[in-house]
Image (tube, rainbow, N blue to C red):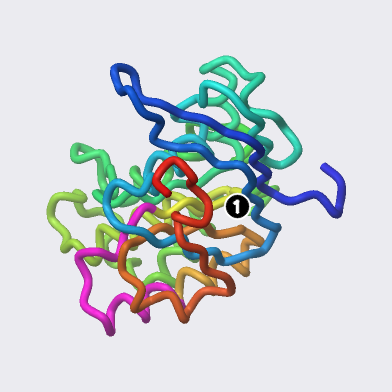
Amino acid sequence: MSLNSPLIEIRDLHFTYEGQATPTLFVPEFTVDSGEELFLFGPSGSGKTTLLEIISGVLAPQSGCLRILGQDLTKMTPAQRDAFRAEHVGYVFQSFNLIPYLSVYENIELPIRLSAVRKQRLGTVDVDMVIRAICGNLGISDLLDKNVTQISVGQQQRVAVARALLGKPQLLLCDEPTSALDTDHREKFLRLLFELAELYETTVVFVSHDRNIEKLFSRSLSMNTINKATS
């Protein structure tokens, strides 16, 4: 990837769910630069989650260009997209998607078990030390041996962030993970998220309908300005 290239670059992207008569997404142009903390806002049905799932490679568009870190995901097979996501993308889901039969520690450790590349980014530093350092920053060090079903929603949120950031992914996608928190806790959580993302040189794309947190981001965009299928 060129030093001047966007981290995410989308051109003329179309996506329609099977069985639908009209497209969910039509994105003529959308870019995200490395190091940004981008806030995408819009109501339910505006295509926020669909866009994240396409950027992550979970879904494939019917047409258009989608380049992440200089690689065109539209040219990849599903298995190649899965491998790319495991190596380069952290994902914090609205419902967190923690594995209920694993401990907090085991959930956080998953990315480096699934991707040798993510583990290699840690270098020669002891993995256990890295996990405990991240958890220390997030205030969940005392929860590592607990099952994730035994901790609060706010604590589960921090476990999901620790898991997403382990192995220094270049891109962090967040799908309304603060929806269950009050205003004070949302702001504290986001400031902590940005500190860790800056530490790990991770770009953040965060989607939500809640514009009260917009001021905390380095840039914000309405989905209506991106997704012309809904305009």
Q: Considering only vertical position in the picture, is 222 above or below 105?
A: below
Q: Confirm whether the magenta stretch covers residue 176.
A: yes
157 with respect to 23 (left or right): left
Looking at the picture, tell me which residue is in the foreground, 46 or 116. Answer: 46
| x 31%, y 69%: residue | 210
Region rendered in magenta: 175-191
Determine the residue located farthest toward the front in the rendered image. 231
Task: Report if residue 125 lies within the magenta region.
Answer: no
Quick check: 65 left or right of 155?
Answer: right
Classify mark 1: helix, strand or loop. Answer: loop
- Counting from the top left corner in percent of width and height, residue 118 is at 60, 41
**Amino acid found under the numbered disc labelled 1:** Lys
Compare residues 173 and 192 and report the one nearer the observer: 173
Q: Is residue 190 above or below residue 146?
A: below
| Residue 206 point in image, percent of width and height | 45, 59
- Residue 207, horizontal then vertical, whole percent: 41, 57
Q: In the picture, which quadrant includes the N terminus?
A: top right
Residue at 26%, 53% (x, y): give it.
145
Which residue appears at 49% of the width and 35% of the height? Answer: 54
Which residue position is annotated with label 1?
168
Task: Report the residue at 60% width, 31% height from top.
Answer: 84
Relative side of 187 to 116, left or right:
left
Left or right, 4 with reference to 98: right
